[in-house]
Amino acid sequence: MTVERLLSTARKELGTKEQPADSNRVKYNTAYYGREVSGGSYAWCAVFLWWCFREAGASELYYGGGKTAYCPTLLSYHRAQAVSDYRPGDVIFFNFDGKKNAQHVGLCEDWDGQYITTIDGNTGSGSEANGGSVMRRKRDKTYIVGAYRPNYQEGEQMSYEDWKKYMDRYLDDLSQQKAEPGYAGQIRRIVAAGVMSEVDGSIARPKSFLTREEAAVSYANLLGKISGQ
């Protein structure tokens, strides 16, 4: 499993909240305990990461394939993989009370040497370590009390189906981009002249690629104009 697959799994959960507030009733706990639970005994920052690793197909990278909802236990288990040169995909442990024990855990998304950005379960503006939401948080390094780097398989090949999904996203991104000011007028001119016509959205997506079909229509229109047909 790659770092990006795990981060993608975590990002899709941003905005998820326990219901009702302050209940710890959330889908990650339901999956972890095999039943719906609620109450102060079910804090779920570590459970959220357990769920993400499981959904990404790499449960063994969380706690050797087992379960723990207790941050100090998870940190101790991975002591041999401890790191301080943080990278995306590292599991980061925090304490917000000035102590050394692991109070909270999140998944590193970015590190600039001073501030670390993580995706966390059970955090929020009202409580860093028990806020009830999945959020992206940026914190000073002074809150970090430990970290470990899972043994990701960075050489894993992307499947053809995954590649097509990324290509579709890329083409969709291109289709949303507008023409540069210097070219917009020229596009309007050539459309008004009847050389370029709407073929599968070609006019609406000036930054995207031109297919052979679209090129053939444009060339045929141009030849027609030249020959007077």
Image (cartoon, rainbow, N blue to C red):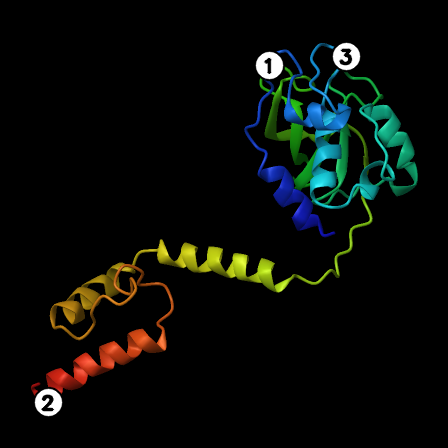
Whether residue 142 is visible, yes or no, is: no
- Look at the picture and state if 209 lies above or below 216: above
Q: CA distance from mark 3 to mark 2?
A: 81 Å
Q: Give me the residue at 81% from left, 38% from top.
A: 62
Q: Is residue 192 left or right of residue 6?
A: left
- Look at the picture and state if 60 lies above or below 198: above
Q: Nearer the viewer, mark 1 or mark 2?
A: 2
The front one of 181 and 202 is 202
Q: Give me the residue at 64% from left, 38% from top.
A: 10
Among the 4 quarters of the image, the one containing residue 116: top right
Q: Is residue 125 left or right of residue 84?
A: left
Nearer the N terminus, badge 1 or badge 2? 1
Which residue is label 2 attached to?
227
Q: Is residue 160 left or right of residue 87?
A: left
Tell me where residue 108 appears, x and y as whole percent. 69, 38
Dot 2 amino acid type = Ser
Element class at badge 2: helix
What quarter of the picture does the C terminus occupy? bottom left
Among the 4 quarters of the image, the one containing residue 159: bottom right
Whether residue 108 is visible, yes or no, is: yes
- Look at the picture and state if 76 lies above or below 113: above
Q: Give me the residue at 70% from left, 37% from top.
A: 52
Which residue is label 3 attached to?
41
Nearer the N terminus, badge 3 or badge 2? 3
Which residue is label 1 attached to?
126
Tell me where residue 174 appears, x and y as whole percent. 40, 58
